[in-house]
Image: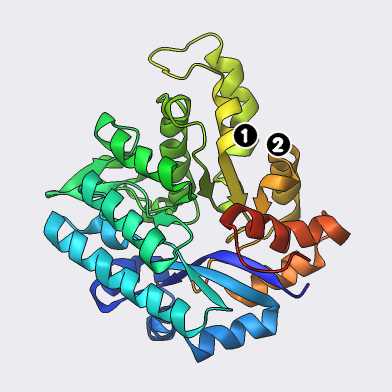
Amino acid sequence: MKGKIAFEEHIAIAETLDSTKAFAGDSGKFEEFKRQIMDVGSERLEHMDKTGIEYAIQSLNAPGIQAILDTSEAIETAKKGNEKLADAAARHPDRFGAFAALPMQDPDAAAAELTRCVKELGFKGAMVNGFTQKGVPDSAIYYDLPEYRDFWATVSELDVPFYLHPRMQIPSRAQNYDGHPWLMSAPWGFAVETATHSLRLCGSGLFDDFPNLRIVIGHLGEFIPHALWRIDARMRFSRRDYRGKRPLGEYFQEHFYITTSGFFHDPAFRNTLDVMGKDRMFFSADYPFENMEDAADWYDGTEIVSGQDQINIGRNNAIKLFDLDLKPG
């Protein structure tokens, strides 16, 4: 399929590159990975052309800004990253858009930076790489907390999507992974961490306060679609401190949007479609952590969707969600 749109696609700047080394794995190919994630020009465009990806919304690498302990440094580094993203979009406006990197260490600064990026730079929303550290290395701050309500009010007012991207849990907070470090990252821990954060948002009353919020998560929903029925079934018997006014599944199915990033598997794709519906599904690759070729070869060849449904998930749904100035297919 030609004309695909992808939007879990990453770049790095010098200040955030080291934080992503663990994501590159132990394959010994970090130099190749470094070249790819620092490039926002010819090599990236060549891969896009080869795989039928017309347009990519790019974002700063994980954990990136969220791993910076000093708030002032986080604010300045986010601005540097956003300037690189803006420059790439300005040089290739028909190929690249951008998500804002945000210094969530300071909710007011994050709201101000998102406003600047959307109103002055034309960004399509934000991508935040999981919980934020602040002050001390073993800190982990989640965005359902009351101090972020004004930030979410800004997201609601701007009416742009917020992409919640995975990161690894802090080792001191993850004793269940002791002795098995492979569990902490993409094979398992990424999904568990992001799913938990997403469910915290659903259970906090956030979507009652801001009913127009739109949250994007990748990797076919970070396991949540598969578990959603059981979550609601058990919550009928044990609500504890659940603060939502409606069943959790209703919030998830109404406020979350799901990409195929890094999860190119027909049975999982079918299950996510069954739970979320075709209008809330989107193609993405997760470059350079995944190959665009792998993402496109799978999506173009899948028998789960075809015809107009495949075009919608691969292109039209993104045009609608991000109000892109592109012609629907």
How does the figure colour the protein chain or chains?
Answer: rainbow
In the rendered image, residue 4, in percent from the top left (x then y), is placed at 69, 69
Residue lying farthest right? 307
The residue that disc 1 covers is: 253
In the rendered image, residue 85, in percent from the top left (x then y), is placed at 39, 73
- x 47%, y 57%: residue: 186
Tell me whether the residue at label 1 lies in contact with that at label 2, contact meaning CB atoms closer than 8 angstroms. yes
Q: Secondary structure at mark 1?
A: helix
- x 70%, y 48%: residue: 268
Residue 4 seen in render? yes
Mark 1 nearby-residue class (10 Å; few <14, some 14–19, many ≥20): some
Q: Earlier in the sequence, mark 1 or mark 2?
A: 1
Q: Which mark is residue 79?
A: none
- Quarter of the image that includes the C terminus: bottom right
Asked if residue 176 is positioned above or below residue 74 in the image, the reply reads above
- Quarter of the image that includes the N terminus: bottom right
Q: Secondary structure at mark 2?
A: helix
Which amino acid type is shown beneath numbered disc 1?
Gln
Is residue 238 or residue 99 the one in the foreground? 99
In the rendered image, residue 131, in percent from the top left (x then y), is placed at 32, 46
Is residue 251 or residue 196 the one in the foreground? 251
Residue lying farthest top? 237
Mark 2 nearby-residue class (10 Å; few <14, some 14–19, many ≥20): some
- x 39%, y 80%: residue: 87
Mark 1 → mark 2, Cα distance in angstroms: 8 Å
Q: Which mark is residue 275?
A: 2
Disc 1 versus disc 2: nearer the observer = 1
In the rendered image, residue 319, in percent from the top left (x then y), is placed at 65, 60
Which amino acid type is shown beneath numbered disc 2?
Val
Residue 25 seen in render? no
